[in-house]
Image: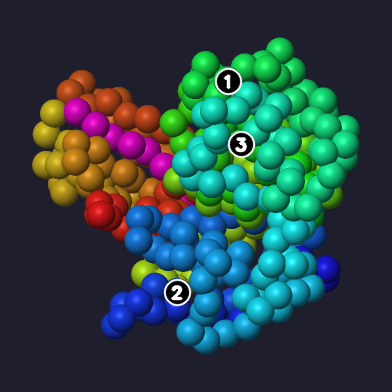
Amino acid sequence: MNAILSARNLRKCYGNQVVVDGLNLSIQRGECFGLLGPNGAGKTTTLRLLLGLIEPDAGELSLLGHAVPRQARAARLRVGVVPQLDNLDPDFTVTENLLVYGRYFGMQDAEIEARIPMLLAFANLTHKRDAKIPTLSGGMKRRLTLARALVNDPDIIFLDEPTTGLDPQARHLIWQRLRELTAQGKTLLLTTHFMDEAERLCHRLAVLDEGRMIAQDTPRALIHQHIEPQVVEVFGEQVTEWAHQHAAQFSVRFEVSGETAFCYVADAQPLLTHLNGHATLRYLHRPANLEDVFLKLTGREMRE
């Protein structure tokens, strides 16, 4: 296997708090790898470690054949980064943002300018090439941030929650562009809180919680390993009372969260027949998905 990024026994502490605890990771060239986890799980710290922005307390890191953090500067010349929050320069135009950013990699202006038409077309921003940043919509800014990360034609792109705050149209366009990148052989490392996004885009993913990796596989394999194949969400008046009286009779496992009972079943038909006789209850029947896996592994409690 051709690992473009690898981590072995990676550990990072802040005081007495272990933020990353023995992480082992290997990402192959040309795949989209997802890092999932609740707030405080260690995702951001992991990204900073992998980029060589902070030094681990223990473990070994290799990025593009370079030992990190010792050779991180050389490695980052072949890396693109899409941060969680857009940090475009508001005083520059769209084109000027790309030009200035390319200079950080030691690129000549002529080389950057030759790439700009392709980058603008990729981001669907050709018509905005001379626009100032404050005039752009949120979706346009996010697409420009993605295009900017490609200025240096990187081998691997780190994307930290790339579609947060976008409307559905913008999200789907970003998804399309990310699939195009992997089709070109680019490697993507993606963090996201959208489980449907991870399920659509990621070839493999890891679930982090309290600094530890608690699961790793393809999205489909994780669903098969951890969750019953079908889910019936039951909601309505007195759903909690109904669940404690009847859910165990029809479910392999059930959970009550708020005003919804989640019933995990191998065969949904007996439960659906039962529910059709309860006029006060409504239900949604669906296949299990990655969000079910995430909530089972990390819990439904809020994280601050």
C-alpha separation, residue under disc 1 versus residue under disc 3 = 14 Å
Question: How many numbered discs, if any?
Answer: 3
Q: Residue 279 appears at what percent x and percent y?
A: 20, 21
Quadrant for residue 209, please give it: bottom left
Q: Is residue 265 left or right of residue 28?
A: left
Badge 2 amino acid? Val
Q: Residue 79 appears at what percent x and percent y?
A: 71, 56
Q: Residue at x 35, y 55 (%)?
A: 39
C-alpha separation, residue under disc 3 versus residue under disc 2 = 28 Å
Compared with residue 153, is residue 17 higher up or lower down, i.e. above or below?
below
Q: Residue at x 53, y 77 (%)?
A: 55
| Residue closest to the eye, 6 or 52 | 52
Quarter of the picture containing the N terminus is bottom right
Q: Secondary structure at mark 1?
A: loop
Query: Mark 2 = which residue?
Result: 20
Query: Mark 1 = which residue?
Result: 132
Q: Give the magenta-colored segment's residue range.
A: 227-236
Whether 237 is among the magenta residues is no
Badge 3 amino acid? Thr
Within 10 Å of disc 3 (Cα), the crowding (few <14, some 14-19, many 20+) is: many
Is residue 229 visible in the rendered image? The answer is no
Compared with residue 206, is residue 109 higher up or lower down, i.e. above or below?
above
